[in-house]
Image (tube, rainbow, N blue to C red):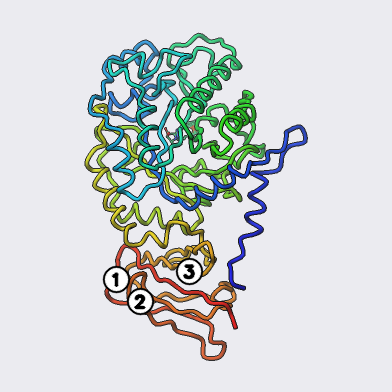
């Protein structure tokens, strides 16, 4: 067998997410959509940008809810939002120098403020701020110019819109009337989505969030139940009608709904649940993505100085790749329009690491060796190169628990070397000749020692 066998996975992916309910139309992704999924999985690394009028306060993107700000008070922030130092070309250059292949930016967060020149509401950056420019247009044009793909993060939840009623779990103190027609809100949301999918060139996808605001969570009951009908399939079909290759993902923290093209995990690797809200979110056959922040907050926070180290961030990316997932790393730009230096520095360090080690990340899939104490594995799409990412710098060797558990090592005679470095010794079982361990060189990358195994067809 020359190639690693991906066919069952690919076939399953063809038919989208879970099983459609009897009354739900089947979703068949177009060939362009499937190609986009493949691109997405190859791309591996993206820049998440949380930016909105909340950056003026500098206390994260939930400030309206957390500080119980009524709509009138929050709206006053718009007059102070004048990001004259915003430079779309510079942002895209920063993402590229980090080795990122796509950008996912908040078109609208839970505060309801639109970061583009919306025609269906003046509550947007072009009509309600002194800045007056359509930030998303500037960024989209620059992304297309610099060959970086663009996703829009779009919040289902809206603390500002008068028709967002019934109220969900959040946004109870914004002073809205205790009445409203949820369908009118959804009509508004779909109209805004239509603007985003028609006025900004090819869009790589839409990243929804906030579904969980309306979730009915009762022990022993289906976690997919909601208080309202979100009309998600209607919205998804609209997006796919306008741009069939646009990938839809939804950060609802439950298993994917039919019509979605990728699955994401917030502040957790696929399969983990350190946050407490990923319990019902098990990895599916769809392309996967994990997102994480550099400090604590998503939106700009003045006092949040607890920055993760470059090593921690690289480990996150590698751990995601080893679990067959992309890594979407967040920055929350300042109200001036600049990305703070602490973020830029870290991104550049990751970029340098990727320049050397990118072969073991880009275009790979999660390897056949499941995550181990020493690290993870990735494999090239043709199945010829297996990368062992040794993340524990204290080890002198890594041992394979049992070749039976790792049939790929049993099946293939192998040679091993450090990526772009010297050959390393493989120990093998005297009787079976199965590889049992790899001796790690003394001089090596202490963030991640990447060992490349060249896999050959068994004679
Ligand atoms: O956009 C960023 C955050 O603002 C947003 N998602 C990322 C990408 C986010 N919102 N909330 N959270 C993240 C944390 C989730 C909290 C939840 Fe709950 C726990 C959702 C459901 C249970 C808090 C309690 C919100 C509703 C009830």
Find disc 1 in the rendering and name its residue.
Answer: 444
x and y percentages locating residue 174 in the rendered image: 43, 15
Q: Quick one: label 3, few (<14), some, or many (20+) residues within 10 Å?
A: many
Q: Nearer the viewer, mark 3 or mark 2?
A: 3
Find disc 3 in the rendering and name its residue.
Answer: 386
- Of 258 and 415, nearer the camera is 415
Q: Is residue 146 left or right of residue 427?
A: left
Q: Quick one: label 2, few (<14), some, or many (20+) residues within 10 Å?
A: many
Q: Residue furthest front?
A: 145
Tell which circle, 3 or 1, labels the residue nearer the N-terminal end.
Answer: 3
Q: What SS does tag 1 mark?
A: loop
Q: Is residue 216 visible?
A: no
**In contact (CB < 8 Å): disc 3 and disc 2:** no
**In contact (CB < 8 Å): disc 1 and disc 2:** yes
Q: Is residue 149 left or right of residue 211?
A: left
Residue in the picture at 40% in, 53% down: 317
Q: Which numbered circle lies on residue 440?
A: 2
User: Image quadrant for the N terminus?
Assistant: bottom right
x and y percentages locating residue 349 in the rendered image: 27, 53
Q: Nearer the viewer, mark 3 or mark 1?
A: 3
């Amino acid at each position: 067998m020359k190639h690693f066998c991906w066919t069952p996975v690919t076939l399953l992916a063809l038919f989208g997410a879970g099983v459609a309910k009897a009354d739900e139309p089947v979703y068949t992704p177009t060939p362009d959509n499937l190609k986009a999924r493949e691109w997405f999985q190859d791309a591996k690394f993206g820049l998440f940008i949380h930016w909105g009028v909340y950056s003026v306060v500098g206390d994260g993107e939930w400030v309206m809810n957390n500080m119980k700000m009524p709509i009138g008070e929050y709206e006053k922030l718009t007059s102070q939002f004048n990001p004259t130092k915003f430079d779309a070309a510079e942002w895209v250059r920063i993402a590229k120098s980090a080795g990122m292949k796509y950008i996912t930016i908040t078109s609208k967060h839970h505060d309801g403020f639109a970061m583009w020149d919306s025609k269906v509401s003046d509550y947007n950056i072009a009509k309600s701020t002194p800045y007056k420019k359509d930030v998303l247009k500037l960024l989209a044009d620059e992304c297309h110019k610099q060959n970086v793909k663009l996703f829009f993060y779009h919040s289902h939840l809206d603390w500002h819109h008068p028709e967002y009623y019934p109220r969900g779990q959040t946004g109870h103190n914004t002073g809205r009337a205790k009445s409203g027609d949820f369908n009118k809100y959804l009509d508004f949301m779909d109209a805004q989505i239509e603007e985003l999918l028609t006025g900004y060139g090819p869009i790589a996808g839409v990243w929804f969030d906030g579904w969980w605001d309306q979730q009915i969570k009762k022990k022993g009951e289906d976690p997919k139940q909601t208080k309202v009908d979100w009309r998600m399939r209607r919205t998804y079909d609209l997006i796919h009608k306008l741009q069939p290759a646009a990938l839809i993902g939804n950060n609802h923290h439950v298993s994917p709904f039919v019509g979605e093209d990728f699955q994401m995990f917030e502040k957790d690797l696929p399969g983990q649940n350190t946050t407490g809200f990923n319990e019902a979110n098990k990895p599916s056959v769809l392309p996967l993505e994990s997102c994480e922040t550099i400090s604590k907050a998503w939106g700009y926070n003045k006092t949040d100085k607890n920055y993760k180290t470059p090593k921690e961030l690289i480990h996150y990316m590698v751990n995601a790749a080893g679990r067959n997932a992309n890594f979407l790393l967040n920055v929350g730009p300042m109200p001036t329009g600049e990305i703070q230096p602490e973020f830029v520095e870290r991104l550049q360090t990751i970029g340098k690491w990727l320049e050397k080690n990118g072969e073991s990340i880009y275009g790979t899939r999660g390897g056949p060796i499941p995550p181990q104490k020493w690290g993870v594995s990735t494999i090239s799409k043709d199945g010829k190169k297996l990368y062992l990412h040794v993340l524990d710098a204290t080890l002198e060797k890594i041992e394979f628990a049992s070749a039976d558990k790792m049939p790929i090592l049993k099946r293939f005679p192998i040679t091993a070397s450090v990526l772009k470095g010297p050959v390393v010794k493989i120990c093998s079982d005297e009787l079976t000749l199965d590889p049992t361990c790899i001796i790690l060189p003394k001089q090596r990358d202490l963030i991640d020692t990447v060992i490349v195994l060249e896999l050959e067809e068994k004679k």
